[in-house]
Amino acid sequence: MAGRDGGARGAGERAPERSEAGAGPISEAPGARGASTAAAHGPGAPCAMGLMELRGVSFRYPGADAPAVDALDLVLPPAGLVAVLGGNGSGKSTLARLISGLLVPDTGTVLVGGYDTRDADGRARVRRLVGTVFQNPDNQIVAPVVEDDVAFGPENLGLPPEEIGARIGRALAAVGMSDHRRSDPHRLSGGQKQRVAIAGILALDPRCVCLDEPTSLLDPASRAEVGRVVRDLAAARHLVVLITHHAAEAVAADRVLVLGAGRVLADGSPTDVFGAPERLRRWGVEPPPAVTVWAALRARGLLGAEPCLRMDDVVRRLGRPPEARTGPGAGDPERSVAPDATRPAGPAPDPAHAPRGVALAHVRYTYADPALPRAARRPALDGFGIRVAAGECVALLGRSGSGKSTVALHCAAILRPDGGVVTIDGVDPWLVRGRGARARALQAVRRRCGLVFQHPEEQFFEERVLDEVAFAPRNFGATREQASAAARDALALAGVPAEVAGRSPFELSGGQMRRVAIAAVLAARPAYLVLDEPTAGLDADGRAGVTALVRRLRAAGVGILLITHRMEEAAALADRAAVIQDGRLVGSGPVREVFAQAARLGAWGLEPPDGAALLAALRARGWAVPDGVLSLDEAVAAIVAAGARRAAQGGEEPRSPA
Amino acid sequence: MHRLDARTKILASLAYMVVLLAGRGPWALGACAAFTAAWLVAARPPLGALWRGNRVLAYLVVATFALGVLLGPVPAPGQRPGVEWRIGPLLVSSLALSEALAAAVRLGLLVLQAALVTATTAPLDLVAGMERLLRPFRRIGVPAHELALMTGLALRFIPVLAEEAQRIAAAQAARGADLQSPGRARLRALVALVVPLLLSVFRRADQLALAMEARGYRGEEGRSRWRQSRFGRADLVAAGAALALAVSVVAASVGWRGGA
């Protein structure tokens, strides 16, 4: 761990006395209302009851209608993991900036270790006690070499070089990045970059590490890496404040806070807070999947009142399987999964006889990287093939760096393949000869196959939503009136209220921004749509809006290629799934079949959807539940069906937790 | 060479540059070439990477030579043009040939020496060396620390922003923006590329400023430097060699002029 031992305190750095006495069990701290006595000690005195104390804290951003944080009272303990949940605009990030002295409350007091953030001196102290890690790792790494970046904080403290060197070593070891001391941050993965950012904070030797949505821009593998580091920090007796909208990350917390409209809506242990999942949804927080399953099974009388926070708990509490007549594995379990009625079977894809659609065949592509010799460049796509027909949704799955986005760029004829063929409805634009003719062919293809990039709202540039959305049809040759009409249609299709059309695209909520960005591509009326991580970075409400839009588009006959890290999303939306690894197609088929191959999913670096994982774990315990299940609802139905068989046999009551 | 103090390398390179450009005659160029060759042997940089990084500049050297030969100097009145050859319609004089060769060698050595310095020095060491060299000039208003910080941030963010520009260009191309199209459409495409890029730069700058503040940055005051550099014996040797080169070349140039 980045040591907080005595040697770590070099010249010029004097942390205030740490109230180790208060580092008791976390559960005692929140109740301690007598904490207000700490005020009497004034600045410089250790805060007896907790490391942090907020009293009547309000903050309003200049020009905002409502306060971001509203009369907040809070005491945080000296150590442990405190998770802060809440939808977009709940005040989470503002809270992070207030407790780290980056913002000063309009009214009320923020005391950290006894120092008040309202006076400049106290603020400097607080910033040294509380280190903040932000959402985007790219925008907090200041140096082009990892070790120099970690050195930045200690340099600011004026520490002697030997001490800085020691801290770099400890901080990088604490986040498992010691092997990358000399690396260029630009060449690291998102998770590695975020771990470097955490090391940069640890090198300051803070008492509290505050992480403001550190994983919301990361893929699942990176998210798990960062999650491990976060838990290690808390275990090393730091106070860790983890701000997140992934409830599953809060399960390991000692205490969970839910914020809404700048107020504390709930405050307690994970069991307390997640025990009421309906309430959480109302607040815009999607409960962890295990909690959803628990609530559904509890309603059917299969589980008791104690909430399950992890899938392991669900499996354990369900216990041994019912004495099913058929026994495990008997019959054809696949049959027992009722086909989802809302999902009409897509057109049978038969590559040889279906010239229509977006098709990549044997595509090879290598990015030019002048820093590397030609032989050392790895192909991004290496003989990749995929086909998307009208009216079907194909999920493209693969870990980061597997080539998914390169596939997207080929579908929309942005990149020209080094080898192989890309056709859109049978047309290969790259075969067209003549400059003008080629340009027209490319425009025609780009119009037919829309491409929505990751974080597409970052491409906004107009002052009005309507102009932003009308940009594509104008480029494809529509008159101003036609383009406006197309834009209005697209906005309506995307579920954006008509009155938003005249507003600035930059002042919308995250979910609405994303739907406007998708509408900006839909306005060209594409027959095919490639969506690259369309729900990345959105909260539960925002995700639901985008998911519903994808369903509507598919129903309207648009062929969709859905690139996603969220297996649940692929399971809920796609007809077929294709898996890409190192630029090669390694698996494809109906989405149920792909997700049923648990062993291969692991080898591909993918995790099965929660529902499939749950049933697989139950099957391993002898439950007669079917394979090929995707959603949590289906999983619950399957468990209930198995349970009903037991009830029919007059089986015993549901087992209580062991 | 890798271990030399960045300050030595910067100063030696500056001296080298002056000598190379001011020195006259084959002796000056020969001495410079020897100096660079010594550096090359001592540093043993990966030649493949050196070539890839400077290929364009190497072409420039060749072009300089070719243009110099073709458009070579017109002999001044009374000056003998030397031997002349006629190649097809071209008239090539030995004077033009030697002048062009000198110019090309001079440019080539300059490029090679600069490439050698950057290949044997971590960019951040160069930045730190610059900061230390400029520090005495703070009193006359040279913002040494700020310049160094900005250079470091530029090194960090240029690849990030280059990638971002590429992504935005691709995204807008997918929306039909065509930078090759004529007239207003082209202007629109340009706006669609530049505005999001600028917005992104501002957004990043904002977040970066906050992150730097969160890491205790308050300007140069009270700050220490982790990257230390020491002026060692090797530095003395290198600096001595550079000085010797400078003196000898200046002397040789004077002699050359005197003789001419």
Image: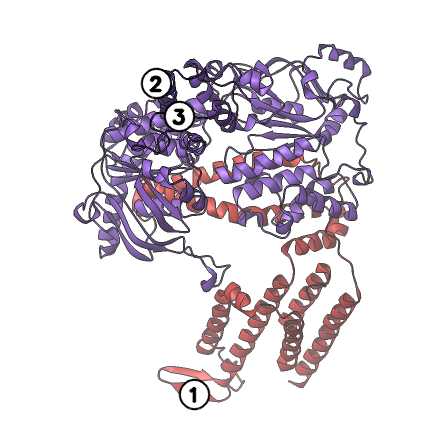
Q: CA distance from mark 1 to mark 3?
A: 87 Å
Label 3: chain letter: A
Q: What percent of the width, then of the height, locates residue B148?
A: 66, 48
Q: Which residue is mark 3?
A: A632
Q: Which numbered mark, 3 or 2, is in the foreground of this view?
A: 3
Q: Is residue B8 above or below residue A281?
A: below
Mark linked to residue A499: 2
Q: Which numbered mark, 1 or 3, is in the foreground of this view?
A: 3
Q: Which residue is mark 1?
A: B85
Q: CA distance from mark 3 to mark 2?
A: 36 Å
Q: What percent of the width, then of the height, locates residue A177?
A: 62, 46
Q: What percent of the width, then of the height, locates residue A148?
A: 67, 48
Image quadrant of residue A621?
Answer: top left
**What hue does chain A carry in this figure?**
purple
- Label 2 sits on what residue type? Glu
Label 1: chain letter: B
Q: Which of the marked residues, 3 or 2, is nearer the chain's N terminus?
A: 2
- Label 1 sits on what residue type? Trp
Label 2: chain letter: A
Q: Which numbered mark, 1 or 2, is in the foreground of this view?
A: 2
Q: Secondary structure at mark 2?
A: helix
Q: Position of A337 compared to A37: left or right?
A: left
**What hue does chain B carry in this figure?**
red
Q: CA distance from mark 1 to mark 2?
A: 80 Å
Q: Secondary structure at mark 1?
A: strand
